[in-house]
Every structure is written in structure tokens, then in C-alpha cells.
Image (cartoon, rainbow, N blue to C red):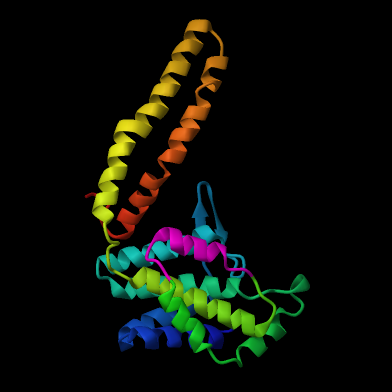
Amino acid sequence: MKWRSHLSIGNAIADRFQMSEGERRSFLDGLVEPDRHGERANRPGHSYRVRHHRASDRVIMIHVWMARKSFLRNDTYQGYRHLGMALHYIQDKSTSKGLMGLTHERREKKLAGLTVPQKAIEVGLKKYVSSPEFVRGTIVRTKPKKDLEEIMVQASFRSAAVAAAVLDASQPPLFSKQMSLARRRHALMHTPLAVGSMAVGLSLALAWNSPFPIIVPLPLVLLALILDRPYRQLKRLAEWNGLRRH
């Protein structure tokens, strides 16, 4: 997308959240930051340049988490900046590059002339859940479109939904009770099942001098991991809400 498209969607979202002048400036600066200076991401042993239209879900989620954690500690400048950068990549991800990128520039120029579909913004601000799982799922479901109207609708809807999810500071109802129950099951059932199964398999492998007994308990370990998934999700949700240590 051209800057004009990014900024049009960004201003529509900023209007809905009634951002102050400083907040809006930080948000819009973040929206164009990847185009202005580019970005590099790090992996163990190397760094690489982030591709605008092919930014990995990992890179987008890094900015989402940095935005969320910044808001939790009341650092709104960094919060809006990283939120803007995350939305930049989501919006670019909505735009197809076409065959070998030959039609990309022409498509983006036409796209810059479209108005922001306010209905898509409105729906995005209603149909969201404030959780990292929701945001990740939204990013994964964002696919490149060729039709100009579809690009703007998807980019506006996804951007509004992610922004609402990151900015929503309310704690899910019954969260403490659900977390307590999941933690109890994790400590008393799932962890002992996984550790105990592997311990028995390892003991038998040493006693029989054969690796086969180690393979036998693997289904039980896999079952324990599957049953423990709600606990891992709730741990991420606790971190999302600044409650990781509680």
C-alpha cells in the first residue's frame, strides 16, 4: 500500500478511538515507519530484512506484543508506534503483488484513491476478542486480494479488530477462576502424566538396554500436551493482561 492508504485507514481508526494529537502522531508514524526506514528482524545466528508484503506472522506478533506491553506500563508513545507498525504489515499483507509483481504498482496507485470503508472499521471494532490467540488468528486469516474494494475492506476490518484487541484493557470474565482450575490440572494431572510416562520409559530402556520403551509412552506425553493446551493459552492471556506473575 501507498502511504496515503495506510494513513487513511489509520486516521479512521484514530477517529474512532478519539486519540489525542500526540497519540495520533505516534500511531501514524508507526504506520509508515516500515516504508520510511525498513526493518530488520533477528533470529538465532542471523538477521534479515523484513519484506513488507511477506512479513512473517512472527514479526507482526512481535510488534503486537510490544504494543500491548507498552500500553500496560502506560508508555503510549511506544504502544501506538508498535501498533501502527503491526497494522502496516497487516495492510500490506492484504494487497496482492500479482504475477511477478508486474501489476503491483498500478494496483497500489488505484488503491490510494479509494475512501476507507467505515462499515468495515465499525465491524472490526465490534467483532474482536482481546487475546493473543485472536490477534494471531486474524493475522493468519489475512490473505492477499486483487480486487481493490476487497483489499480496502479486509485491511480496514483486520486493522480495526487488531487495534481494538490490543487497546482493550478489560480482563476477561471469570479469568481468575479459569486460570486457577487450569493451573491445578497442570500441576496435579498433566505434568505428572507427561513426566511420569517418560520416566518409566527411560527406566525400562536403561534396564532392558533398548530404546524401544522410550517410544511407548510418547502417546501419553502427546495426550498430556493436548490436555494442557488450555493452561498454555491462559498463561499467554495472563501475560497479555499483565498478570503473568499472579
Q: Is residue 212 above or below residue 55?
A: above
Looking at the image, residue 240 sits to the left or right of residue 212; the answer is: left
| Residue 131 among magenta residues | yes
The structure residue drawn at horizontal position 48% and vertical position 11%, both measured from the top left corner, is 204
Stretch of the chain drawn in magenta: 128-143
Compared to residue 217, the image places residue 18 above or below, namely below
| Quadrant hosting residue 66 | bottom left
Residue 239, image x and y in percent?
A: 31, 55
Find out whether residue 161 is within the magenta segment. no
Residue at figure coordinates x 46%, y 77% from the top left: 124
Residue 71 in the image: state x and y as whole percent: 30, 69
Q: Residue 140, located in which quarter of the rendered image? A: bottom right
Q: Is residue 30 visible?
A: no
In the image, residue 92 lies at what x, y percent?
Answer: 58, 74
Q: Residue at x 59, y 84 (%)?
A: 2
Q: Nearer the viewer, residue 4 or 160?
A: 160
| Horizontal side, residue 146 vs residue 82: left or right | right
